[in-house]
Amino acid sequence: MKILIKNIKGLAGVESDTLREARCGKEMDKLTIISDAYLITNGGKIEDFGPMNAMPNGQYDMVVDADERFVLPSFCDSHTHLVYAGSREIEYMDKIRGLSYEEIAQRGGGILNSVERLRQASETELYEAAMERLNEIIMYGTGAVEIKSGYGLSLESELKMLRVIRKLRENSPLEIKATFLPAHAVPKEYAGRADDYVDYIIKDMLPEVAREKLADFVDVFCDRGFFTTEQTERILFAALGFGLRGKMHANELDMSGGVQVGVKYNALSVDHLEFVGAKEIKALMTSQTMPTILPGAAFFLNMKLSPAREMIQYGLPVAMASDFNPGSSPSGNMQLILSMACVNYRLTPAEAINATTLNTAYAMGISQTHGSIAIGKVANFYITKPIPSIEYIPYYYGTNKVERVFLKGTEYKGMT
């Protein structure tokens, strides 16, 4: 199907180099916008774009007039836990009363609360609920998403989650990456025996996940009160033996050493990063690991903010994802993440857009096909409602500025 989008007020996120993997440092503030533009897609890929006065003649299956509207590459949300059973609003009340994340976990809440619920849920229940969440994030402009397991914490339940993710990937127009997160917490049956649980992950869980080819990556929660650097290294080393690259939950609660371990094992991303200092920045500067901040979690838990500006000033790239999950960030709205990036972390709108598109695409391993408007890339983009400027998108927070969504060159009109 060949589609023409014409009279675009501003075509944003344009790249002439389709091989650009990420934007780093000062480059993050560069966002190419073509005014009064056209965009042509064909067969699910971007075929051509440019100013209207250079638009070629042709025959099209669909023509869209985007007068007074902007077109942007779809968000890539590189960190979510959106396959889960039930909400956790009771813990929300505990947070309001002043209990910390760790105190809630010690009372049987937190991740272990979600584990208990997920183990009781069927694959059908999990799939149907997750499909509704996928529909929601698509309508807010997300075109690619990474989904983690980690609420099973047993072979049977982790496989159940990963099979649900596989089914979502088969039936959703979104680009979906699956991450195996067995070390999200120590399950109750292994309380006080974290090393034994790590043995179980390595000897029983990893081989089966690899055999069924259910995961693209492996993740570990390396932080105070969860998994140590030594335990994390064991899991990441074993995962590499199965061809699974690491991703990390790191430095959310303390200077855990997780960033350095992630860099040592060439993790694709290290995520959260509320606690980042000179040693962490130095390690990241010599790596191919994407620092990924999760503004929704820091906001919801009222935590200190990651030093995004400092990392950018040192020349690092920064990605920002939603951390969509039932306990610490119950929203997958990447437009809200865009606003938080600007207001809370002092990124410019250009930096924030790059942080939620091209750089998050890198954090998913798909930046050569997603995350920007470039010839040959997948035609994942959205058309805004009539708005005055790009800056208006993060500025006018709380409402959906997306009018139409195109995924793989086809307009998405919601669940059928």
Image (cartoon, rainbow, N blue to C red):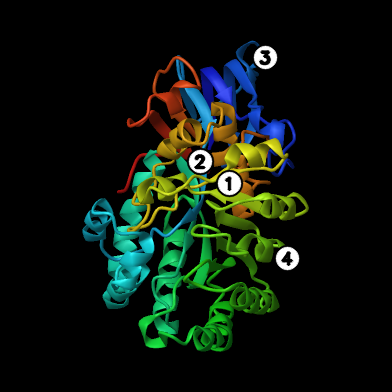
Question: Which residue type does callout 1 highlight?
Answer: Thr
Task: Name the residue that disc number 1 marks.
Answer: 360
Mark 3 touching mark 4, by CB under 8 A? Answer: no
Residue at the extreme top: 53
Task: Specify the quadrant of the image occupied by residue 155.
Answer: bottom left
- The residues bearing labels 3 and 2 have C-alpha atoms spaced at a distance of 28 Å
Under tag 4, what secondary structure? helix
Q: Earlier in the sequence, mark 4 or mark 2?
A: 2
Residue 405 is marked as none
- The residues bearing labels 3 and 1 have C-alpha atoms spaced at a distance of 32 Å
Please give the name of the residue rendered at 49% of the width and 59% of the height, measured from the top-left corner.
253
Give how far across and how far down residue 89 sits, in percent.
23, 56
- The residues bearing labels 2 and 1 have C-alpha atoms spaced at a distance of 8 Å
- The residues bearing labels 3 and 4 have C-alpha atoms spaced at a distance of 49 Å
Mark nearest the camera among 3 and 4 is 4
Q: Earlier in the sequence, mark 3 or mark 1?
A: 3
Give how far across and how far down residue 301 sits, in percent.
37, 51
Mark nearest the camera among 4 and 2 is 4
Task: Name the residue that disc number 3 marks.
Answer: 54
Q: Earlier in the sequence, mark 3 or mark 2?
A: 3
Task: Name the residue that disc number 4 marks.
Answer: 264
> Eyeballing the image, is 15 above or below 79?
above
Q: Earlier in the sequence, mark 3 or mark 4?
A: 3
Q: Earlier in the sequence, mark 2 or mark 1?
A: 2
Q: Is residue 240 left or right of residue 411?
A: right
Residue 75 is marked as 2
- The residues bearing labels 4 and 2 have C-alpha atoms spaced at a distance of 29 Å
